[in-house]
Amino acid sequence: MIETKKISLPVEGMTCASCVARVEKTVSKVEGIKNVSVNLATEKVSFDYDPELVDLKDVAARIEDAGYKLDITETTNEEISETELKTSNSDYQQELKKDLIFSIIMTIPIAIINMGIMWEDFFLNNHLNAEQINKILLILTTPVIFISGRRFFSIFLKNLKHFTADMNSLVAVGTGSAYTYSLLVTLFPEMFPHHQNISHVYFDTTAVIITLILLGRWLEAKAKSKTGTAIKKLFELQPKTALVKENNLEIEKSLSDIKIGDIIIIKPGAKIPADGLIISGSSAIDESMITGESVPVEKIIGSKVIGGTINTNGYFEFEITDIGKNSVLGHIIKLVEDAQGSKAPIQNIADKVASIFVPSVILIAVLTFIYWLVFNQSDLSVALINFVAVLIIACPCALGLATPTALIVAMGKAAQNGILFKDGESLEELHRADTIVFDKTGTLTEGKLSIKNIFFDGISEKEFLSVLASLEKRSDHPLAKAVIDYAADKNVTYYETEEFENRSGKGLIAKINDKLVLAGNAQLMQENKISFERFSKELSNESIKNTSIIFLAIEKDLKGFVTVVDSIKPTSKEVIDGLKKINVTPVLSSGDNESTTKKIAGLAGIEKYFAEVTPHNKLLKIKELQSENKKVVMVGDGINDAPALAQSDIGIAIGTGTDVAIESAGVVLLSGDLKGVLKAIKLSNKTISVIKQNLFWAFIYNVIGIPLAALGMLNPMFAALAMSLSSVSVISNSLRLKSSKL
């Protein structure tokens, strides 16, 4: 079976939601391509493709035939480079700027002449007649149309070939009609006996519309470039060079020249260039730019360091384990880029409207022209100017930008706070959450478990720990780690295990020296009919209440148990209180015993809890809540949380947890701080609010503007200004998310 590849490539020339629909349709028709997503704000197309069936050059050719340009240049090395960000946007801005400046230079004299002819003492009126002034205006306007406005007409002609239309078509038809009419009046005045007055040519309207739309596009491009500043900041976390240790010498190398296995020297205040493991020295590392944690993290020999983080005051050397796109920073950048390129379900509304928007506007404009000319028996010039106003006021651009710009800014804001949304749907769904189910160990609690008590009988302490640790070393459960750490301090002997079995949510079973050994909770012991009578006194002891218990039985004879304690995270209570304030119900779900689960729930301020639940039962509890029409979020960090994370409406994984949990979640908190849950919900609420505002204004603008233009109440020049500013206002509104407090 051939594995598909996912790719994201820049597309030049997209200006509105209709362009997005066309590019999406064009790419979707290619055999071997699926899951196509086009983002107007990032100007990129993303899709999964089969390399054996799909030639990217063919895809590029099809897109070019549709009127756009696809950049299929692929990065062949594994380093992450800021140049990958510099797509067509910067070049596009420069082109727009040049065309805009030229258009302004030519439009200013056109406007002056047009205003001047209304004054009797205007100098041209004393030397030239109306026809001659018209010819001067024609000479000045023609370069504006065919040089500054060429982009609108070239795309319009390509669209015409495919019987499609977009924003460029509206501009081209509107300005082209006004220009052609004015051209005929100027060169063949006898064709228009009632149009000898200079006021009946619309060269000024044509030039001003082109200038204003170019101004709007340029402002839009500048504003769009600001939406990606979070990604740029992530790239900037990388240092340009690294200090490599070779033959006991310090050699400064470019980041592109370092490789896995190199020994890197890190001095106080230096940025860490790649991921790796410390082999000598120690220090405290500022990881706030990656995890959002403000307190530097202590690192010693064997500790992992992350590229892009900053050393504080120590000196150490580390060996590179991952670099470039395979590093933590590389994965974060990829996740953020993928999320920014995804679509939120709320965007479907705008997409459906956009698919019929431009043809509908052209139909309304034609009907407007017919009404004014035939039914209202108005001048041809009046019908024409209202026809142009309808075409120019319509703005599918704002509709196309309403959702993606807000998503891009939100994803960047989230990344700066150590929160990664995997896609737009996760961000949108989170704002509907009314119930959050928390795992206990490592989520609400620190997860730094320690042995509190050991009780044994009929076996020595050393033998008890040896047998228990021999099973637990085969598990990655936090309880197992507590046993292994404790056993390591006692220098115990480890035995070989056979027929090992992990009973999820209950414990471990194996054979040691042909003897059946069980290590786990009370439920595992009860299922195997193992009596607790020998330890009835110890089990009723006050000191073991609110602790987690691991029992050990050999040949169905209970040999003893250990109690394990954990402490609640300092922020857990604050986060739970914060959730209650925004009407979100917190629930605790744990595989631990009733008394411990109840104790932790009480400390955190959680009223509802589920104790002694297996991973499968956690999933069933999620389903149970969903059957009550609850929108359920699951927060967890372990393998045992993965099924529940996948079942929940939105899964939030603690980034300090396992890869399986992270893979199953829609949101990842890079640090273990639960405040990220509250921040993620607040950001989701604010983002959806901004998207709704954007869509409202984009719709209401068109709903009000188009009828006004059709009724002859809107000058085309004002229509052009309003149309240009509509897109800029949508982007500016989205940019407010950058400064919002979480």
Image (spheres, grey):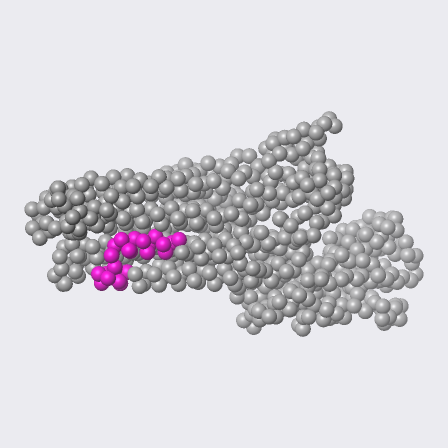
| Position above or below: 534 against 256 | below
Residue occupying image coordinates x 74% and y 65%: 592
| Position above or below: 705 against 56 | below
Q: Quadrant of residue 526?
A: bottom right
Please state the extent of the stretch shown in magenta in the rendering: 706-728
Q: Position of residue 626 (x, y in %)?
A: 57, 69
Residue occupying image coordinates x 27% and y 53%: 717
- Quick one: quadrant of the C terminus? bottom right
Q: Nearer the viewer, residue 539 or 357?
A: 357
Residue 712 belongs to the span the image colors magenta:
yes
Q: Position of residue 480 (x, y in %)?
A: 77, 55
Residue 277 belongs to the span the image colors magenta:
no
Q: Quadrant of residue 264?
A: top right
Q: Nearer the viewer, residue 739 or 301?
A: 739
Q: Quadrant of residue 380?
A: bottom left
Q: Position of residue 681 (x, y in %)?
A: 56, 62
Residue occupying image coordinates x 53% and y 56%: 739
**Image-based side of 683 in relation to 502, left or right:** left
**Image-based side of 237 in relation to 338, left or right:** right
Examine the rendering and report whether any part of residue 25 can be seen: no
Residue occupying image coordinates x 64% and y 42%: 307
**Image-based side of 643 in relation to 161, left or right:** right
